[in-house]
Image (cartoon, rainbow, N blue to C red):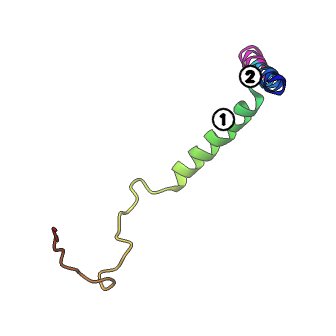
Amino acid sequence: MFKFLIFLFFFFLILVSLLGFSALRTFRNILFGNPKKRTQAHSSDAADRQRRRNSQPHPSHKKIIPKNEGEYIDYEEVRD
């Protein structure tokens, strides 16, 4: 019984510490912003603009599998 109570105590401490770290990270991001998101946002915006300039307005929708591959199989439902 004593071991189970110690396990519950340490489990509770771990949960509280994770909750605390999450709250601290959230407050830090609110107050100072997230530098990773800012740099990624700028680089991804520039990359998206470049891709749009280089891409065709409407990509072609061609069949991937040619007509001469595969075979037609009749479907017949079998009931017991």
Sequence-wise, the earlier of marks 2 and 1 is 2
The tag on residue 49 is: none
In this orientation, which residue lies closer to the viewer: 62 or 30?
30
- Specify the amino acid type for callout 1: Ala
Residue 67, quarter of picture: bottom left
Report the mark closest to the observer, 2 or 1: 2
Residue 28 locus on image (x, y percent): 77, 18
Instruction: Please name the residue that numbered disc 2 is placed on.
Output: 22
Instruction: Please tell me which residue is depicted at 40% across the width and 59% down the height of the picture.
Output: 59
Q: Residues within 10 Å of mark 1 (few under 14, many from 20)?
A: few
Task: Tell me the magenta residue range.
Answer: 20-31
Instruction: Please name the residue that numbered disc 1 is placed on.
Output: 41
Distance between mark 2 and mark 1 Cα atoms:
22 Å
Instruction: Please tell me which residue is depicted at 70% across the width and 38% down the height of the picture.
Output: 40
Instruction: Please tell me which residue is depicted at 64% across the width and 42% down the height of the picture.
Output: 44
Q: Residue furthest front?
A: 1
In this orientation, which residue lies closer to the viewer: 37 or 6?
6
Callouts 2 and 1 close, C-beta under 8 Å: no
Residue 22 locus on image (x, y percent): 74, 22
- Specify the amino acid type for callout 2: Ser
Q: Check the picture and name the quadrant holding the N terminus.
A: top right
Magenta segment's dominant SS is: helix
Instruction: Please tell me which residue is depicted at 71% across the width and 30% down the height of the picture.
Output: 38
Q: In the image, is residue 33 above or below residue 64?
A: above
